[in-house]
Amino acid sequence: MDALEIARWQFGITTVYHFMMVPLTIGLGLVVAVIQTMWHRTGKPEYLRMTKFWGKLFLINFIMGVATGIVQEFQFGMAWSEYSRFVGDVFGAPLAMEALLAFFVESTFLGLWIFGWKQLKPAVHLACLWIAVIGSAFSAYFIIVANSWMQHPVGVEMINGRPVMTDAWAVFTNNTALVAVPHTLFGALAVAGAFLLGIAWYHLWRRRHDGIDTIGADGKVIPGEAAIPGRDRTDHAVWIRSLRIGAVVAMISFAGTALTGDLQGKLMFEQQPMKMAAAEAACHDGTGFSILSVGNVGSKNCDDVVAVIEVPGILSFLAKGDFTTEVRGVNSLLDQYKADYGTNLPDNPIYGDRAGQEIQYVPVMEVTYWGFRMMIGFGGVAALAALAALWVTRKGTVPASRGLMRLAVFGILAPFGANAAGWIFTEMGRQPFVVAPNPDLSGIDQVFMFTAAAVSPGVSAGELLTSLVVLTAVYAVLLVVEVKLLVKYIRGGVVAAMPELAHVPADENEDATPRDGGPGKPGGTDDVLAFAY
């Protein structure tokens, strides 16, 4: 057993799992804030129901994200203490601001929003949600500032072998972060869009399957009413509006991720050329973009990689914005990396048994190559599905096909896959560095750290393996809990988040009409606690 590899697996599993919660929290929070704003301005009951239903799912995901995110903080000190010592002076500021400022604001105002449905004025209540959502965006910004410094170190000076922050403005305005933040936020909106689309499709299909909604001679939907609480015409409006909002959000977010991703790719070609060369399987200098390359699984170089389908000029466009500039390939970059950073790890106790070993500068090409394509492919599929959904539902409902319904529901996973693939590509493509060096000689070129030097020297492989197994098991249980909660409230529909819609009068003098009117009239007497818990 190798302590470094186990530590990397542990961090990878817990981080990717935690990040499943993050984009849904950020994206869905923003969508819920917009929907509540629409309710506040129009007073239409469907917008209140949408706010309560999607807000309930947002809260379930938010608290699970908090629970899984706490582990991340502990891993830095327990499994990666040498890394923490190296980056501590730089990471202290953004991580402290994330925890003490952004997350504090986010959680405080989210609490006010949860329990303030009747206690606060409608405008103040709405403002609480917007502040919480903005806080979550700033939380993401501070985290990405720290991560971007690992990708592109700036604003520091090496003192006694450690980088010390000398220019906070440079760290917080790192061009890598300024491009990564909107790319991440658009990715979060893509997740939210697919989430709305898939769930709304399911409920519209159920209404057709149960015979509540029918199709007229002109092909347009005729919304019906059922004796079941909440299954009225307003319920139809909830789902068709949610579906179309989700589809529009999904398409806009894909366009945003494509534009910001192009900028991010051009920066990566400058800052981490080996990562992008491996992502394109560009073994030799040239201009061609690989549509399909094949090679030996686990290969550490390009000797056995063959481009089956290649388009000339596209790689140059992705890297430089033109179609003629040659881009350096893996083989020539490998010689440069060896010349700049050595062929073997230093003979230093910090590297343990790896001291003196040959450095593998080429990341696992199967991961970078297919991760890059999965990120784009899943995102593109989700956008095309959203466009198709807008066309299919133009007459007010979804087809009666059970297969299409299942496809729409499983389509929720596509942008999740795109987000996960993107982060795996970003982090594994940086290897063998945990803090990547700047390829330009700007005075801070020697600010880098090999991953082999980052792991805690006092932690054994057995201890790391134990924590890996325990954390993976705990996270698996939490996954089951989250999925069961989400499925429960999704199947329950709006009534699951608004039990007041199923309110039965205590006597004949009490009004039995569901109370979901305009702003300031959210519903029955127990709606706050029912919504919160």
Image (spheres, grey):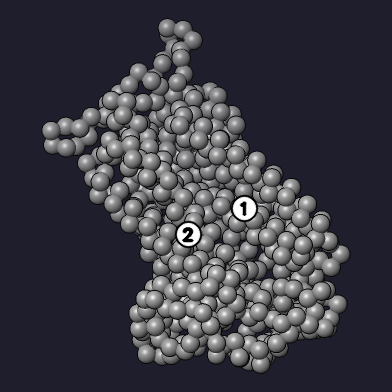
Residue 388, x across and y down, in percent:
28, 51
Counting every numbered tag in the picture gives 2
**Amino acid type of the residue tagged 2 in the rendering:** Ala
Q: Nearer the viewer, residue 308 or 291?
A: 308
What residue is drawn where x is 63% and y is 68%? 147
Q: Could you tell me if residue 175 is visible in this image? A: no
Report which quarter residue 480 is drawn in: top right
Q: Could you tell me if residue 358 is visible in this image? A: yes
What residue is drawn where x is 41% and y is 40%? 199
- What residue is disc 1 on? 18
Q: Secondary structure at mark 1?
A: helix
Residue 86, x across and y down, in percent:
77, 74
State the quadrant of the C terminus.
Answer: top right
Residue count near mark 1 (Cα–Cα under 10 Å), binned few <14, some 14–19, many ≥20: many
- What residue is disc 2 on? 418
Q: 131 above or below 374?
A: above
Q: 368 above or below 489?
A: below
* Residue 279 relative to residue 516: left or right: right
Report which quarter residue 363 is drawn in: bottom right
Q: Secondary structure at mark 2?
A: helix
Residue 120, x across and y down, in percent:
55, 37
**Amino acid type of the residue tagged 1 in the rendering:** His
Q: Residue furthest top?
A: 508
